[in-house]
Amino acid sequence: MFRTHVGAVMTPQSRELAELKASILTQQQELAHVSTQLQELKALVVTQQQVLMFLGKELDTTQPASMTTVASASAKRARVVRAKPGAKERKPPQKGSSKPSLNF
């Protein structure tokens, strides 16, 4: 048997009970700390949502003018310059005889 600091005898069951109470107290303190952290995170999420909503509204108000400019610039870059049909197939005129010569 164990003696406490006040001189009372501590049985194994009472020692186990004291350990359980200490464990519960520690868990309660940890729970309070985690709850505080959770509240801070919730506040941070709310703030981030507000910032995102503000930026989204700002983007909506500036987007129509800038999108028109971007769209026209994109369209200009996307145009393919095409050669006239058959332009690549034509051979440049040969100087001299227009008929090939057959030299044996």
Image: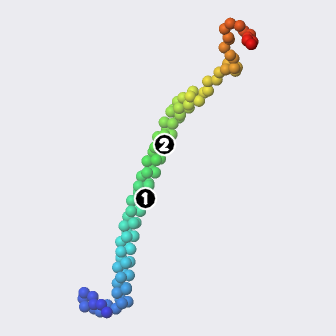
Depth check, front residue: 16 or 32: 16
Query: Badge 1, how many Cα within 10 Å: few under 14, some, many 20+?
Result: few
Residue 15 position in % (x across, y down): 34, 87
In this picture, is 94 found above or below 74? Answer: above
Residue 10 position in % (x across, y down): 31, 90
Residue 46 position in % (x across, y down): 44, 54
Residue pointed to by mark 2: 57
Depth check, front residue: 33 or 81: 81
Secondary structure of the residue carrying numbered label 1: helix
Among numbered discs 2 and 1, the one appearing first in the sequence: 1
Q: Amino acid at mark 2?
A: Lys
In this picture, is 92 found above or below 62? Answer: above
Residue pointed to by mark 1: 42
Badge 2 vs badge 1, beta-carbon distance below 8 Å: no
In this picture, is 19 found above or below 41? Answer: below
| Tag shown at residue 67 | none
Q: On the rendered structure, is 15 left or right of 61? A: left
Real-space Cα distance between discs 2 and 1?
Answer: 23 Å
Residue positioned 41% across, 58% down in the render: 41
Q: Amino acid at mark 1?
A: Lys
Query: Badge 2, how many Cα within 10 Å: few under 14, some, many 20+?
Result: few
Name the quadrant containing residue 14.
bottom left
Quadrant assignment for the C terminus: top right
Q: On the rendered structure, is 102 left or right of 71? A: right
Residue 68 visible somewhere in the drawing: no
